[in-house]
Amino acid sequence: MKKQHLKQSMKAFVEAAQIPEDFLKGNVLVSMEGQERVVIENFKGISSYTEQEIRLVTNRRKICVSGKKLRIVNYTKEEIEISGYINKLEYL
């Protein structure tokens, strides 16, 4: 009974705080605008960074963004924004 009450309380909190379910499950959220911009949310860190390739660490896998003149435009604890000419986005 106690476990069910805890689940209901947690669900109510998540709904009230408007936290995306994907975020809670540790899923990575990827948004792309053409080949020039990508925003990746819910990642752990950067494992390597060059103008041709940026590798990110997530809870489950690594993500590799490949292209030309890549740069990190915005970087916070929650998300990273990469711009440049993006050729490929790959889960490793």
Image (tube, rainbow, N blue to C red):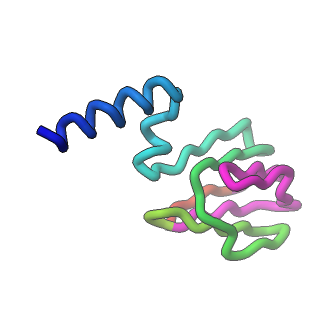
Q: In the image, residue 14 lies at what x, y percent?
A: 44, 32
Q: Give the residue furthest to the top.
A: 16
**Residue 55 in the figure: left or right of residue 10:** right
Task: Residue at the far bottom: name it.
Answer: 48
Near-viewer residue (92 or 10): 10
Residue 82 sits inside the magenta stretch: yes
Q: In which quarter of the image is residue 55?
A: bottom right
Q: In this view, does 48 lie to the left or right of 23?
A: right
Q: Which of 88 and 9 is in front in this view?
A: 9
* Residue closest to the eye, 88 or 54: 54
Q: In which quarter of the image is the N terminus?
A: top left
- The tally of labels here is 0
Q: In this view, does 47 lie above or below 44?
A: below
Q: Locate residue 21, reporting x and y percent.
A: 43, 37
Name the residue nearer the viewer: 43 or 38: 43
Q: Kindly identify the residue that appears in the image at 76 percent across and 49 percent down.
A: 81
Against 21, residue 42 (above or below) is below
Q: Is residue 35 left or right of residue 15?
A: right
Q: Where is residue 28 in the image (x, y as percent from the top left)?
A: 52, 50
Residue at the (40%, 48%) spot, across then down: 25
Looking at this view, name the residue that lies furthest to the front. Answer: 2
47 lies above or below 88:
below
Residue 11 percent across, percent down from the top left: 35, 31
- Residue 6 image-quadrant placement: top left
Q: Quadrant of residue 77?
A: bottom right
Task: Determine the residue positioned at 56% across, 60% down.
Answer: 90
Q: Give the range drawn in magenta.
A: 62-87
